[in-house]
């Protein structure tokens, strides 16, 4: 028992919250599990937590029971508001719920640092939200850490290392200025209804500065071009970026015959720097 509120199955029955595919709904009904996910976010006391997609509120309850100073929950499905209001009543002044689309709402006005993001993300918007959190106008970002549930395959792409199939844009974008690790994997049966695939929680901590200097947009351009044609040699995959791409690859310590999958973050950053300073680089 993490609180005195009714079990989630009862909440779902009372509010008729049958999961809808269109909202990407797969609910966690085991409060011990949601409390575990909340703990994976580290010490929440003294922090404001942003939760996307609280649904019937299992994770929300885990976060509040773990001592979060405040939880701001953004939920698109209006059917969930009644259940969430009951949680707000049990934790006076600590849960604020905003009804609407997380992709359209700027949560910052409602949050006070330090801020942590914790969410069991709807599959249809999970990657989009992660990319937005990882590419803010300013670094360090407003959040200290992101503790996020993804399909396992997406989680593996986030933490992937060079030389693996999962290695690509997502790994490089996240690992350039954050530390990412998988802290928990869950079988489909942990959810109601059970999805087709396993899930995993990734814990991402923002670094104060990028690991290696590079212009964010140039790095993104290089990495996108390299992995868009990941089976090609880099001198071919990147030839659209600069007429002297072979020389620039060599300057960055990269064999022009290498493929994107083999190249470490440090080398991609060196190539982005070489392209930024090379004449015609902005082409
Ligand atoms: N957090 C709950 C749990 O762990 O049981 C529900 C997780 S469920 C995978 C995803 C939740 O996100 C659903 O409640 C869904 O209605 C909500 N959702 C889907 N798209 C959304 C969006 N664009 N903005 C906010 N919430 C969204």
Image: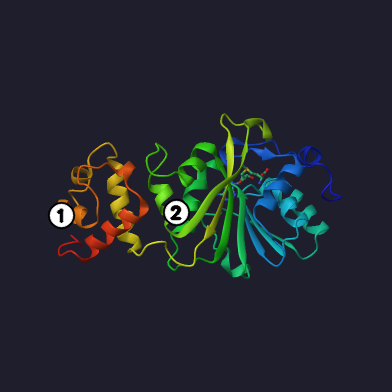
Viewer-side residue, 274 vs 77: 274
Rendering coords of residue 278 (x, y %): 18, 64
Task: Classify mark 2 as within 8 Å of ligand 1 or not, answering yes or no.
Answer: no
Residue 8 in view (yes/no): yes
Q: Name the residue under label 1.
A: 247
Looking at the rendered structure, which numbered label has been put on residue 120? none
Looking at the rendered structure, which numbered label has been put on residue 175? 2
Question: Nearer the N terminus, badge 1 or badge 2?
Answer: 2
Residue drawn at x 80%, y 63% is 92
> In the rendered view, would you say 269 is above or below 262?
below
Residue drawn at x 42%, y 44% is 161
Left or right: 219 in relation to 11: left
Element type at mark 2: helix
Rendering coords of residue 258 (x, y %): 24, 42
Q: Quadrant of residue 8?
A: top right
Q: Distance between the residues labelled 1 and 2?
A: 27 Å
């Amino acid at each position: 028992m993490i609180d005195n509120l009714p079990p989630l199955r009862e909440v779902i029955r009372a509010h008729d919250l049958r999961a809808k595919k269109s909202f990407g709904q797969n609910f966690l009904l085991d409060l011990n599990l949601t409390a575990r996910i909340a703990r994976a976010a580290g010490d929440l006391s003294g922090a404001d937590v942003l939760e996307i997609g609280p649904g019937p509120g299992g994770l929300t309850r885990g976060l509040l029971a773990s001592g979060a100073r405040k939880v701001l929950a953004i939920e698109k499905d209006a059917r969930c508001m009644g259940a969430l209001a009951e949680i707000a009543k049990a934790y006076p002044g600590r849960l604020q719920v905003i009804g609407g689309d997380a992709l359209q709402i700027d949560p910052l006005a409602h949050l006070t640092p330090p801020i942590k993001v914790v969410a069991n993300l709807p599959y249809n918007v999970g990657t989009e939200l992660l990319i937005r959190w990882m590419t803010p106008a300013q670094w360090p970002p407003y959040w200290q850490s992101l503790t996020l549930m993804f399909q396992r395959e997406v989680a593996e792409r986030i933490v992937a290392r060079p030389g693996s199939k999962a290695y690509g844009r997502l790994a490089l974008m996240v690992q350039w200025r954050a530390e990412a690790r998988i802290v928990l994997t869950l079988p489909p049966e942990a959810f109601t209804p059970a999805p087709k695939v396993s899930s995993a929680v990734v814990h991402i901590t923002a670094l104060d500065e990028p690991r290696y200097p590079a212009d964010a947009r140039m790095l993104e351009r290089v990495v996108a071009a390299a992995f868009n044609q990941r089976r090609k040699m880099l001198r071919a995959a990147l030839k659209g970026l600069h007429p002297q791409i072979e020389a620039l690859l060599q300057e960055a310590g990269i064999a022009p015959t290498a493929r994107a999958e083999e190249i470490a973050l440090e080398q991609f950053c060196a190539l982005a720097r070489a392209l930024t300073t090379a004449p015609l680089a902005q082409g």
